[in-house]
Amino acid sequence: MFIDEINALIGQQPTKDISYKIQFDNKVYVHNEHQVYPSASTIKVPISIINLQQHFHNYEDISLTVGEKVGGCGVLHTLQSVKRLTLWDTIVLSIIISDNTASNMLIDNIGIERINEGFMALGLHDTTLARNYYDTTGINEGKRNSTSAADMFTSMQYVIQENDVLPEDIRKDFFEVMKKQQINDRIGGFFNIDEDHKDEFIASKTGSVTALEHEFGMIQQNGKQLIFSVFSDNWPSNQEGKHFLNELGQIFKKYMN
């Protein structure tokens, strides 16, 4: 059985800090879905949603200044001549290559307090934004961005289903951006998605820091849909966490074939 294989795989892992919320074949499966973890890059999705919600009338025209450039994922910290970006292009960079500088621009555009208010309005009660990415002072003060598998599953609903948060044309455009997300070697590693086949796709967002591996999103293939949010922490190595997500993806693919 689908969920039995998933739970058996989890039982074989060297960490007990694994949570999930998965919807497949008209059923929803959960395990410690409200356990709170460091969010890593996963909350870049609801941060983007809140920016689009606040600026839906001019998201293609509003221009943001490229602020302090920070390391990690992304390209902006290597592009010396780029001084400004549209809000939309900033969102695209924060999602498809998880650009940390772009993500900080989105945070600064709304403000941490208003973003947290936005999380609550979206029903993301396990999610907190405490600092910008690569804010060493905040890190040293113990400030932690956090969320849960359940909350990122909820975030995905705002991307894949018509709702009263985002205008429908903007929601569809953002959904397309998530389909272009380039860090797709975890759960998506076993799926051979035909990019020319519009009925097949993986739309997801990963999160990875030392000893932690998260991914949430949606897979569509062979006329079947699977929505997933899988969070994990305290791996002996990140490679083991990535391997777990690979094996989980293999189970997903087996039941979607």
Image (cartoon, rainbow, N blue to C red):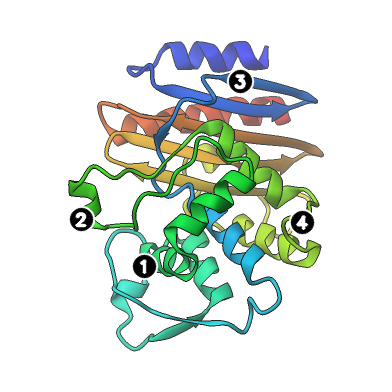
Mark 4 Cα shell of 10 Å, populated few (<14), some (14-19), many (≥20) = few
Q: Spatial distance from mark 3 to mark 2, Cα to Cα?
A: 35 Å
Where is mark 2, residue-wise? 136
Disc 4 versus disc 1: nearer the observer? 1
Reading the chain from its start, which is encountered first: label 4 or label 3? Answer: 3
Q: Spatial distance from mark 1 to mark 2, Cα to Cα?
A: 14 Å
Point out which mark residue 198 bears.
4
Q: Residue at image x 45%, y 56%?
A: 113
Q: Which amino acid type is shown beneath numbered disc 4?
A: Lys
Where is mark 1, residue-wise? 101
Task: Give the structural element (helix, strand or loop) at label 1.
Answer: helix
Give the x, y percent position of residue 204: 57, 47
Task: Give the structural element (helix, strand or loop) at label 4.
Answer: loop
Task: Give the structural element (helix, strand or loop) at label 2.
Answer: helix
Disc 2 versus disc 4: nearer the observer? 2
Q: Spatial distance from mark 2 to mark 4, Cα to Cα?
A: 42 Å
Q: Dividing the image into 4 quarters, which one contains the N terminus?
A: top right
Where is mark 3, residue-wise? 30
Give the x, y percent position of residue 99: 41, 63
Q: Which amino acid type is shown beneath numbered disc 1?
A: Thr
Query: In front: 35, or 214?
Result: 35
